[in-house]
Image (cartoon, rainbow, N blue to C red):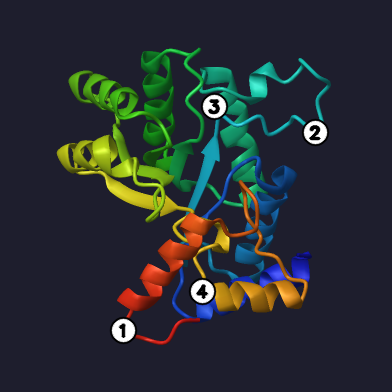
């Protein structure tokens, strides 16, 4: 998708009432943050948009030489500083509504991460803190540390959750309920594979596979059965 088509899609999203945009410093080799920033600026929409971005992913991996990007990944303080600095510049904004810790690397300390994140909240560069796909015990340890030391806790959890991947429900849901955290599921349609077999066959004849982040674009037998169950359980027309 080029920039013109991306802006057209964002315009339609905004016209329909959408105002919550999820980004990350490493999406599309940093281009996604840049395009979102340009789009918001050209439409004068910053104050009306809730913008989320992420850090901890190696967002300079395509630019820095191998083994030279240690300060651009992980949730330690140097990575946080340079990532937020760059995201604010690319997004053309003074603040980030929700900043997620994208990866749990187990190399930095929870204390350092929460202390550093809290400073950004105090500075007004970040409003709320979130975390992605981390084990419940890590998030719990971080939030207990934050609450007992007067720091800003995580208030949003983003994780994979759909009818085929339900590990989310075992520990993440109870943890989120305990801490009063908002939930932002991703991959809820399993990369577009939750479609009727008829629809998938029609797409295949037209040479249009589903665009999926992980796994094969082809349906497995299990996915076919789940999709059939969704069709039977829905009251409307299947699309």
**At 56% across and 29% down in the image, what residue appears?**
56
Which one is in front in this view, the residue at disc 3 or the one at disc 4? 4
- Residue highlighted by disc 1: 235
How far apart in space, not on screen, are marks 2 and 1 (Cα)?
47 Å
- Residue 179 in the figure: left or right of residue 132: left
Question: In the image, is 128 to the left or to the right of 105?
Answer: left
* Image x and y of residue 63, in percent: 82, 31
Q: Is residue 197 above or below residue 103?
A: below
Q: Nearer the viewer, residue 65 or 229?
A: 229
- Quote the CA–CA distance across marks 1 and 3: 46 Å
Look at the numbered discs 4 and 2 and tell me whether their residues touch, using CB distance below 8 Å.
no
Q: Could you tell me which residue is drawn at 37 percent across and 56 percent down?
A: 163
Element class at badge 2: loop
Between discs 3 and 2, the one toward the N terminus:
2
- How far apart marks 4 and 1 lie (CA) works out to 15 Å
Q: CA distance from mark 3 to mark 4?
A: 43 Å
* Front label number (4 vs 1): 4
- Number of marks in the image? 4
The quadrant the N terminus occupies is bottom right
Residue 152 appears in view: yes
State the mark number for residue 80: 3
Q: Residue furthest front?
A: 221
Q: Quadrant of residue 82?
A: top right
- Earlier along the polypeptide chain: callout 3 or callout 4? 3
In the rendering, at what x and y percent does residue 145 appear? 25, 19
Question: Where residue 62 is drawn, which disc sits there?
Answer: 2
Q: Earlier in the sequence, mark 4 or mark 1?
A: 4
């Amino acid at each position: 998708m080029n920039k013109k088509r991306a802006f057209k899609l964002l315009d339609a999203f905004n016209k329909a009432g959408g105002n919550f945009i999820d980004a990350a410093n490493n999406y599309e080799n940093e281009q996604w943050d840049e395009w979102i920033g340009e789009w918001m600026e050209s439409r004068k929409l910053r104050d009306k948009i809730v913008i989320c971005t992420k850090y901890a992913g190696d967002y300079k991996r395509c630019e820095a030489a191998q083994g030279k990007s240690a300060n651009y990944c992980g949730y330690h303080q140097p990575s946080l500083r340079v990532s937020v600095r760059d995201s604010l510049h690319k997004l053309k904004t003074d603040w980030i509504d929700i900043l997620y810790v994208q990866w749990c690397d187990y190399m930095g300390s929870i204390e350092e991460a929460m202390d550093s994140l809290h400073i950004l909240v105090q500075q007004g560069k970040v409003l709320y803190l979130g975390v992605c796909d981390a084990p419940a015990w890590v998030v719990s340890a971080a939030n207990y540390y934050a609450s007992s030391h007067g720091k800003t806790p995580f208030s949003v959890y983003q994780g994979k959750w759909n009818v085929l991947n339900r590990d989310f429900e075992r520990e993440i849901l109870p943890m989120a309920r305990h801490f009063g955290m908002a939930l932002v599921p991703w991959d809820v349609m399993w990369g577009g594979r939750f479609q009727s077999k008829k629809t998938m066959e029609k797409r295949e004849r037209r040479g249009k596979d589903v665009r999926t982040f992980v796994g094969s674009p082809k349906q497995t037998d299990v996915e076919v059965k789940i999709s059939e169950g969704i069709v039977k359980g829905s009251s409307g027309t299947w699309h």
